[in-house]
Image: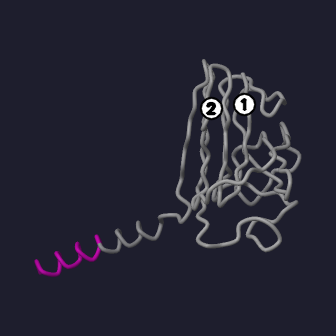
Amino acid sequence: MKGTIYFTLLLGLLVTDLANAQSVRKSQKGTVSQQIAQTMISIEYHRPVARGRVLFGDEGIVNYDKVWMPGANEATTIEFSEDVSINGSELKKGKYSVWTIPGETEWTVIFSNQWDAWHSRYPEGEDELRITAIPEEGVHMEVLAFYFPEVTEDSAILRFHWGSTVIPLVIRL
């Protein structure tokens, strides 16, 4: 009887561990925040992995000239505690989902009012702002990353980077 109870408990623990291991997403959640003066910027996203795949273009997993959300799972969100300017265009404080339309020579970056969205369902008609960004070539980044390589007292550069593609956004207060 005692042996059966121990076996049942052990089996239960193994099944629980296996279930937890299977629930780990391939695209892990990431967050990054940056304060510029009194303004806080926070980004939440899931980080897809390149895994040797061609990422962008006609042969890639992300097609040119079609809406793509930079991330996986739930939509990538960005939140501003104060009004800002991004690449010269005004954006009110608030929380937005981030979408893009990749192109060979320029990308459209979209900030949508519908921040609570799934990554594959672009919320048509909910755009707060669309801007243009010029992609840059960078070193290979295996896992999608958002980061702030430059910060001053009234501005910052936000980059999102996957594979060798880097999209810079200039944020000013």
* Residue matched to label 2: 41
Q: Is residue 4 magenta?
A: yes
Quarter containing the N terminus: bottom left
* Residue matched to label 1: 171
At horizontal 81% and vertical 46% (from top left) the residue drawn is 134
User: Which is nearer the eye, 12 or 114?
Assistant: 114
Q: Amino acid at mark 1?
A: Ile
Badge 2: residue crowd in 10 Å (few <14, some 14–19, many ≥20): some
**Region of the chain picked out in magenta, as a range:** 1-13
Query: Is label 2 in contact with label 1 (beta carbons under 8 Å)?
Result: yes
Say whether residue 120 is left or right of residue 132.
left
User: Which is nearer the eye, 78 or 16?
Assistant: 78
Q: Quadrant of residue 37?
A: top right
At horizontal 85% and vertical 59% (from top left) the residue drawn is 104
Q: Quadrant of residue 102?
A: bottom right
Q: CA distance from mark 2 to mark 1?
A: 10 Å
The percent coordinates of residue 69 (x first, y second) are 73, 54
